[in-house]
Amino acid sequence: MTKKKIGPSDIEAVARLARLGLSAEEKEKFGRQLNDVLLYMEKLDGLPLEGVEPLSHVLPLQNVMRDDTPRPGLEQKQALANAPEKRDGFFKVPPVIE
């Protein structure tokens, strides 16, 4: 098994992309951790997977959803009942564009 190596320049590039300021100790620590991940991926590459179907989850999952049936909504007065501020039948909110 070949040992893939992530160097300090790779760690610095990823940190720069993620806008992280890393100390020298953190760069060393994360470099070791990423190299361990790569070594594990190499082990997985060696598994015999002929005939194994690809899957997205280990367990069979199925969404449980209720029927989408229309129901009456709130009246305007009910919707505005707990609003801290309202004006002319609408919620009053602070401006977001100056």
Image (spheres, rainbow, N blue to C red):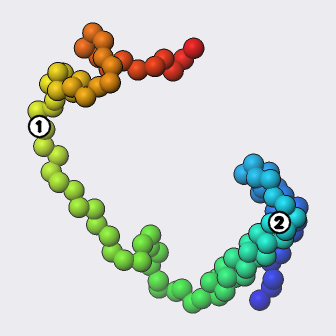
Question: Which tag is nearer the camera, tag 1 or tag 2?
Answer: 2
The amino acid sitting under disc 1 is Arg
The amino acid sitting under disc 2 is Lys
> Quick check: 92 left or right of 64?
right
Most extreme residue toward the top is 88
Q: Position of residue 83 (x, y in %)?
A: 29, 25
Q: Position of residue 31 (x, y in %)?
A: 80, 71
Q: Which mark is residue 27?
A: 2
What count of labels does the image hold? 2
> Quick check: 6 left or right of 40?
right
Asked where in the image residue 76 lies, by quadrant, the reply is top left
Q: Position of residue 71 (x, y in %)?
A: 11, 37
Image point 13% across, 38% down: which residue?
A: 70
Does residue 10 appear in this view? no
When the figure is inspected, residue 33 is found, relative to residue 64, above or below; the finding is below
Bin the neighbour count of mark 2 within 10 Å (Cα to Cα): few under 14, some 14-19, many 20 and up. Answer: some
Bin the neighbour count of mark 1 within 10 Å (Cα to Cα): few under 14, some 14-19, many 20 and up. Answer: few
Q: Position of residue 38 (x, y in %)?
A: 72, 76
The residue beneath circle 1 is: 71
Image point 57% across, 14% down: which residue?
A: 98
Real-space CA distance between mark 1 and mark 2, rounded to the nearest whole angstrom: 56 Å
Query: Counting residues from the N terminus, which is met first, the one under dot 1 or under dot 2?
Result: 2
Image point 80% across, 66% down: which residue?
A: 26
Image point 42% across, 77% down: which residue?
A: 58
Does residue 21 appear in this view? yes
Q: Quadrant of the N terminus?
A: bottom right
Q: Secondary structure at mark 1?
A: loop
* Residue contact between numbered discs 1 and 2, judged by CB atoms under 8 Å: no
Q: Closer to the camera, 66 or 96?
A: 96
Q: Secondary structure at mark 2?
A: helix
